[in-house]
Image (cartoon, rainbow, N blue to C red):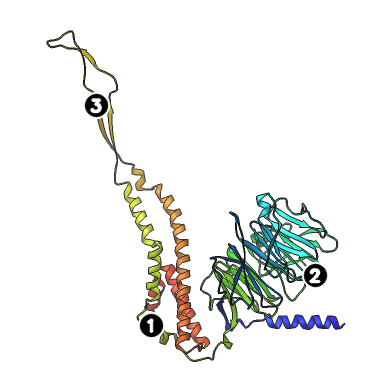
Amino acid sequence: MIHRVLITVLLLLMELNLGYSMNNAHWQKIGQGIFDSEILCLAVHPDNKTIYAGTAEGIYKSLNQGKDFSSVFQTFGSDRGVNFLYINPLEPNAVYAATNSGLFLSKDHGEHWQGVFNPTEPRARQCLSVAVNEQTIYVGTLDGLFIKEANESLWHKRKELSSNVPVTFITHDSQYFYFATPTELWRIDKLGQTYQKVFTMSSREMNVVTENTDSPDDIEMFAKQIKFVTMSPVQDGFLYLATTKGIFYSDSHGDHWKSLAADSLPFEEVTSLLAMNPTEILVGTTKGLFHFADGTWKQLYQGLTTNQVNYLASDNEGNLYLAADGEVFLMTDEETLANHVSVDYADIERKFVGEPTIGQTQAMAVDYAEVHPDKIKSWRRRAERKAIFPTVSVGLDRSASEFFHWDTGGNPDTLLKGKDFLEWDVSVSWNLGELIWNNDQTSIDSRSKLMVELREDVLDQVTRLYFERRRLQAQLLSAAETADPRFDQQMRVAELTALIDAFTGGEFSRQLRKQ
């Protein structure tokens, strides 16, 4: 009885700790000492101080909650990169690293590493996920699921899952281990060792209770690929699935599923999902970070200098960590950083009249990246004029035969060689059908689509950096005092307005000025 009470109290405390006040949430950049350009995953030790970061080149370790990192492992070979880090909860000193060149293990807090799974088959060598059940090790690879039982030296490939498909995620609760492929979720009973499929992309097999859908036919619109799988930290058997068509959850170990209303989320771009408690989650995407609570979604952006979210993690005290390209962020409560002062965004803007405006900055970025819309327009004009100009062809032909003849002059018995015979011609033609349709337009349309996507990425990134810089400038001007929420809302409106202008060529602001 006492044991159950202690567990209940612990779960309540965890829920309170993880219930971050997102209204004042602010991401603070940490992670000094990481020099790799891409941070792919994070793992937090139960001591809440030690953090491991997996990158495209190796592993870094921090002993002070991510403030400073040092390199502890470098991957090797042509296929490099750390895809997943796992700390054994029953043996916290043991850290597993699933890499593109095999599975590695450190038994001494990351100080020394040894290879424990390095098959010769290239697809099996690319490890994507790992988990441990007592002494049994499960490894998800590009070639399926491999298991090494306790007291055994050989690895065995499990055939129960769909043959030769990647096992991208592995997680577990008190009763089951869960294995995700690109299209299915399986579970295995820790006692009975029986495999069962609990989620699939096929609507005919998927046991889903849909919320916010109009008819059963809407199920056909759901997930086509599983993007991320995670467990609730405070409720056993509570799973979340992020897919390309929606986010699903189950509070019954995967027996029954429901869907979250998330029409505005970029499902195709989901990279990470973190369950804070059964009613609150964070979703990381390549388009930004999103928070779900009380049935509503909100984008979190304060303090982030990038939209690219690679991984989300938390510790036992409720601290939240975010991995991006070359950067690690820690979530803090802005209320604790400074006192409120009344600051108006227009007043801040007047202090920086000598600096380039956001419009000028966007124009510089577009010009530097060579993605201006006029480039495509110029291609189209040239393609349209192509039919006006003729195709000119010039030909020149030299006779290859030898022309010999008898001299008709004073030496009639002499055989003479004649001069070379040359022919030439010029032809001019028009394809009048190109006045109606030019085949070059198809190529231009394809290039235009790629250029628009690149320009959107450039403008989105430079706009975020510009306003994050301005936000820090405002804090410095107010002597490290943060402005009241109204100031941040004003800046957010200005930022969103600038983004809309970036996508409309400034027409949005021009229409606003007419009102």
Residue ID for mark 1: 352
Q: Residue at 47% across / 61% down in the picture?
A: 453
Q: Amino acid at mark 2?
A: Ser
Query: In the image, is 1 to the left or to the right of 293?
Result: right
Q: Residue at 73% across / 61% down in the picture?
A: 179
Q: CA distance from mark 2 to mark 3?
A: 92 Å
At label 3, counting other C-alpha atoms closer than 10 Å, the crowd grade (few under 14, some 14-19, many 20 or more) is few
Residue ID for mark 3: 422
First in sequence: mark 1 vs mark 3:
1
As drawn, which residue projects farthest toward the top? 413
Can the viewer see residue 186 in this picture? no
First in sequence: mark 2 vs mark 1:
2
Residue 63 in which image quadrant = bottom right
Residue 106 in which image quadrant = bottom right
Q: Amino acid at mark 3?
A: Leu
Residue ID for mark 2: 174
Q: Contact (CB < 8 A) between labels 2 and 1?
A: no
Query: In the image, is 286 to the left or to the right of 190?
Result: left
